[in-house]
Image: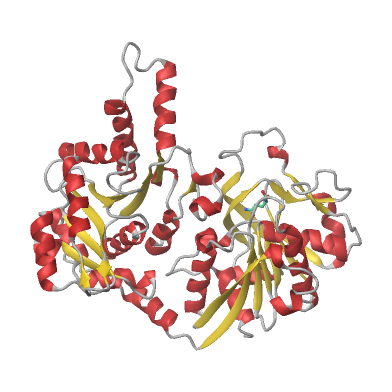
Amino acid sequence: MSKKITKYIFVTGGVTSSLGKGIVSASLGLLLKSRGFNVTIQKLDPYINIDPGTLNPYEHGECYVTEDGAETDLDLGHYERFLDAPTSQNNSVTTGKIYQTVIEQERKGDFLGKTVQVIPHITNEIKRRIKILAKQNYDIIITEIGGTVGDIESLPYIESVRQLKWELGEKNSVVIHLTLLPYLASSGELKTKPSQHSVRSLMESGIMADVLVCRTEHKIPKDLREKLAQFCNVSLENVIECKDLDTIYEVPVYLQKQNFDEVVLKELNLKTKKESDLKDWKNFLKRYKNPKKTVEIALVGKYVSLQDSYKSIVEAFIHAGAEQETEVKIRWIYSGDINENNITEIFKNIDGVLIAPGFGDRGIEGKVLTAKFARENKIPLLGICLGMQIMTIEFARNVLNLPKANSVEFDAATPNPVISLMTDQKDIFDKGGTMRLGAWKCALKPNSKLAKIYGNRNISERHRHRYEFNSEYQQIFEKNGLLPTGFNPETKLVETLELKNHPFYIGVQYHPEYKSTAETPHPLFSAFVNVCAGK
Ligand code: GLN
């Protein structure tokens, strides 16, 4: 049997950032997967941080966590949500990681006698990181290059793509360039010049774009398509329109209509009899776009002015909402604004509340008030990670009569540390990549609400935290009705809490949102939406 050849797709961006390379990559991945190819998507990020784990969400949006505990760019969330398949450490590369590896090798003496340089040492390491995924038996690897062509930071990546294209030979790789056609309202025209310039900039680096994907507010007239093809040196059918749509979930369908997957496969000399098939995807879309009812859920957090900070939660509500044929409207609430005087007004007519994950003490007391309000007024509440810790603090203060109870994250000297630093964390001082990260098993109690929701007592969920429920308080919580129901099977760490005699008051130390995908909504979000909808 001949050895399988892995094909490579490189996605670059021009004109501006935020054009949606991640969504285009994810959509293409979905189309190719539906044709039977084994596809994965990788992101190369040109910043010097080793990973986004230490970045403020305001800088970079949510930090997404993979099964194997990589802290990554939020685009990896899109890849998983579209492909319905997990990514891993190898799917997320940064300039920081590249340099770290090369410098460690230099110190070991691997390059003894040689000058270590961007070319070839950095570019070799970039190429190694791209090709490493081929070992996992993928037919196609899509590599999204962060940033915009022409950026100083992107140059080594672009040069690596040039070299790889050459090394791989004809028809084994394809470069897709995503660009913007700005619309000038005064003259009513779409303009192609910025795209021409960005394609030229790629060419100056020795790369010819094979396919152009054009973000545009309006349909591209035929003559403009021809102009783009001619001046950007691509064939006419390789000019793909990516018009602004109501939802990112429509993008795969829109691109399929223009034979995007067909065009790419032709460039890669890959043939399949199977057409791309978006039946399940379209079914999800139909339900999402035709809800039978609406619920309003408050998302209480401290980064609410940048909604990308909670990307996976928002998307998980979309998936669960579609499944339940329910539109989920989010009421964004900054926890620092909540006080005893305005809380009733803030949550007026709300169907449910989610207390978001987070770090640091800003806005904490507003979250504690929220937990109390939802508990006393029997409003469905889901607490995620910090959210579960808040529910613990509130219950300790107001039900167990421990008014000074706190997490040691916020008050190191609290007499009642109901949330304490995890034992494994006690000797850790570095901040980067040192939290409890990635998937851990959790055993649910037989008659718990959660066991019923999951339909399974043995689950596995992803984590990102340093603090935990302090097991010394387990019995007293249990006795008073806030029940620990999920435990790490080995360490017995408490991972979930449920309140007795409440329609839905559930806290989880893990992040269910990371595992929700369009085609496999997360059962906990589905159950929560269901309860909020009064079912
Ligand atoms: N700050 C808390 C901890 O580190 C919660 C983290 C989170 O919400 N992801 O344990």
Is any atom of residue 69 visible in this view? no
Q: Position of residue 164 (x, y in %)?
A: 21, 38
Q: Quadrant of the C terminus?
A: bottom right
Is any atom of residue 93 visible in this view? yes
Q: Nearer the viewer, residue 13 or 391?
A: 13
Q: Position of residue 453 (x, y in %)?
A: 62, 71
Residue occupying image coordinates x 53% and y 61%: 306
Q: Residue furthest bottom?
A: 292
Q: Position of residue 338 (x, y in %)?
A: 73, 68
Say above or below: 331 vs 441. below
Q: Nearer the viewer, residue 457 or 281?
A: 281
Say above or below: 34 vs 177. below
Say above or below: 225 vs 346. above
Q: Position of residue 523 (x, y in %)?
A: 56, 70
454 left or right of 244 in image: right
The image quadrant that residue 426 belongs to is top right
